[in-house]
Amino acid sequence: MRRIFPFLCLVGGIALIFWSVMEMMDAKASLKWPQTDGEIISSEVKKRVRQNANQSGVRRMLYKPEITYEFEVDGNRYESEKIAFGDSSFFTKGPAAKIQSQYPVGKAVTVNVNPARPRQSVLEPGMTSKAWILPTVGIALTGFGLVALLRPTKSRKKAA
């Protein structure tokens, strides 16, 4: 029973690393994606409450710029909300509002579109510094899981 949590950390960490690497590959590829014209159709800062993972009752506010834009590829209209690769949530409203103010409703924008999947697009191609957060967490979880699983238990020490 004591091995379940480390095993879950190990599996979760590996999954997070895998997902993050895929996201980072898309971020790098987005620098070469073709561009098309688009328009901002919705622009606001969303506020949400986040409960701490340890359920201590501590609640934190997170602020996220919610930008929706539309664009056209091969006669098909698409909508997307992806501003950049990497999380765009903040603990204070200021940084979210700064990003949101760059994209007012009606603004013409350049949209970078994945040619293989036009539904995948981004306004700011490439990686942001926040793109490194999830793989770092994944590596830490994987490391913790491995160390905890490979560490001898009391019953193993007595047997030796």
Image: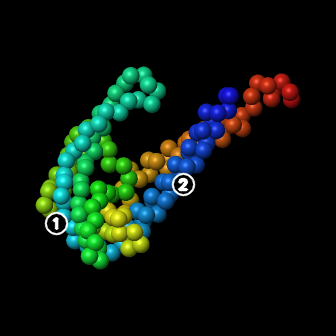
Relative to 80, 15 lies left or right: right
Instruction: Judge whether 33 appears above or below 70 on screen.
Output: below
Q: Amino acid at mark 1?
A: Ala
Left or right placement of residue 108 versus residue 118 in this view = left
In the displayed orientation, state which residue is furthest to the bottom.
74
Mark 2: which amino acid?
Phe
Vertical placement of residue 104 versus 78, above or below: above
Q: How is the image coloured?
A: rainbow
Task: Give the quarter of the figure containing the C terminus.
Answer: top right
Where does label 1 land, which residue?
A: 108
Q: Identify the secondary structure beneath mark 1.
A: strand
Counting from the top left corner in percent of width and height, residue 106 is at 13, 61
| Residue located 19% across and 60% down the image | 40
Residue ranking furthest to the right: 160
Q: Residues within 10 Å of mark 2 (few under 14, many from 20)?
A: some
Q: Nearer the viewer, residue 48 or 89?
A: 48
Question: Which residue sits at x=21%, y=42%?
Answer: 94
- Horizontally, residue 12 falls left or right of residue 79, namely right
Residue at horizontal 16 percent and vertical 66 percent from the top: 108
Q: Give the farthest residue toward the left.
A: 106
Residue 3 horizontal side relative to residue 77, left or right: right
| Disc on res. 18 | 2
Q: Which mark is residue 86?
A: none
Q: Residue at x 28, y 72 (%)?
A: 76
Relative image position of residue 126 (x, y in whole percent): 37, 63
